[in-house]
Amino acid sequence: MRNLSCSSAIAVLALALTACQQSTPQVVEKVVEKVVVQTAVVEVEKLVQVTPTPEPVGEKIVILGVEGSLPTFDPLNASDSRVDTASINIYNALRQNIPGTTDVENELATGYVMSDDGLSYTFTLRPGVKFHDGTELDSADVVYTVERMLALKTGYYSSLKPLTGATAIDPLTVKLQLDSVFPALPSALVRLYIVNSDLVKANEEANDYGQKWLQNHDAGSGPYKLDSFEPEQQWSVVKFPDYFKGWEGAHVDKAIVRIIKEESTRRLALANAEIDWATITSADNFVAIKELSGVTSYVNQTINQFYFAMFTQNKYLQDVRIRKALALAYDYKGDVELARLGFAQIAQGAFPPSILCHDNTAAVSNQDLAKAKELMAEAGYPNGGFEFDMVYQGTNAQEVQAFQIMQASAAELGITVNPLPAEWSAKVKLYSSPSTAPGLGTIWIFPSYADPDQFLGRLGLTSAFGNYNFAYYSNEAFDKVVTEARSELNPEKRCAMYKESQRIWMEDQPYINGVVGQSLAASRDYVKGYIWTPSHAFTQNLYLMSVEDKYN
């Protein structure tokens, strides 16, 4: 139904190239960049269009300034918020978050039925959904998307490991199979973006499932289609007229996302109306931006929690009393008030209170130096007298200040904490083996969906050694209850299990529960419709935004 004949495809391509030559010449440059494909680094030579499509008269354009360039447009990597910003605008998922909430509703699906044993979910698909090339989405595209994820085992695969396959029942019905009960599946599908299977297959190379091609192309059905991409500079998307949700009301016709790494430069660009919206990471800059005229500032509560991992195999940190002493020594109020200028909340337990099954009886993290010193004495180190390294992101002002606060707090116990600044990839490499793991390390959890397992499973299971379990924490009782909770279909029993696992967590103190973050952003006053959605942290949903007053 979708396949063009070879001669037809060549004819269409020739006409398209002729049209380009008759209107605006396209400037093309050859770019060689290093791309990480699973664990190998390869050099990929590719052609990148660097001249964006000319702006039609009356086109409504929003220009965003962000800190980092996305590494790929492949939606399988949407666990990375930079990729998720492109993906949520270019693609659709079976189910998606209701904007501004952690609740989930049908998107490409119109409904689903879970089997009695909980090991399969059968989805009915929305008819008439078109991909950007005009072909219609059907169950074969869902099957291929799942098979592609299972074959590549990268990106969002880590959030959907119980998913083992998909079967097309008919063109608008698809069954997803699991190897274990996974009650969170309907919520976890929000970043499994469905690709145009025929288009990706046509661009596969050496069984790569289109990874190379999708680095700078799109195969989506979302409200916008990829228009241009200049690596490390900017990328843009334009309105897809046949989007199934329609274009009633105010929307942007085009979005340009500019990579402006220096926050002071982003702030100046926003002040001069060179950009319309900007992401802000520094509380200092945010306070300064709030004073600008013609600018709206945004503070949004997240479900992202900040921790200090304590390497439990360390000679000293293997003693829970020393771990608890460090947790009681840390100056949480100083962290919130000095490092973050009030734009955070002190953590209460293992994960944020807004997450399902949170134990509201858990203690809010607090400083108690007297109790901390008692515990040090009980452990046989009344005067401290030992040291270890702490790894943190040295280019992030808040993490630098968090390190300084920890260093000063630990010094109150006679413990020396040495600085080990590193970027995320280097930090992950250090924690990939217990032989290189430092005593302390910072880690944020940005959940891909609002579920306790996104925190407890990632940080606490023995099976997560070498991954996000930086503490190398291992407790058989904890492993058992978290694993059982993952597959418990009864909501009340499931919550009881997760509350028990939180109790064990608090007793064992493998991590210092730091703060729950807040998201900061700013825009010109004429930008409307920007909404923060907790499960899509630091992602901009362009379909909701408008800039009508920019053109009045």
Image (spheres, rainbow, N blue to C red):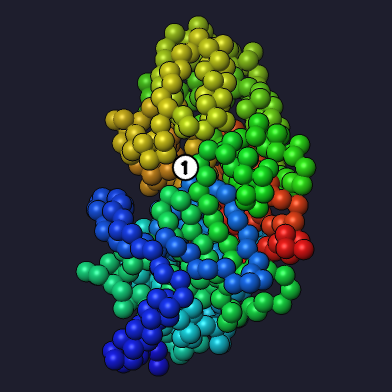
In the picture, the quarter occupied by the N terminus is bottom left
Q: Nearer the viewer, residue 4 or 274?
A: 274
- Indicate whether 32 appears above or below 152: above
Residue under the image location 34 percent in, 89 percent down: 11
| Amino acid type shown at disc 1 | Gly
In the picture, the quarter occupied by the C terminus is bottom right
Residue under the image location 50 percent in, 48 percent down: 259
- Indicate whether 317 appears above or below 276: above
Please indicate, yes or no, whether residue 174 appears anywhere in the rendered image.
no
Q: Secondary structure at mark 1?
A: helix
Residue 139: x %, y % from top left? 45, 83
Pointer 1 residue: 460
Residue 451: x %, y % from top left? 58, 55
Residue 308: x %, y % from top left? 51, 31
Please indicate, yes or no, whether residue 221 appears anywhere in the rendered image.
yes
Q: Residue furthest left?
A: 206
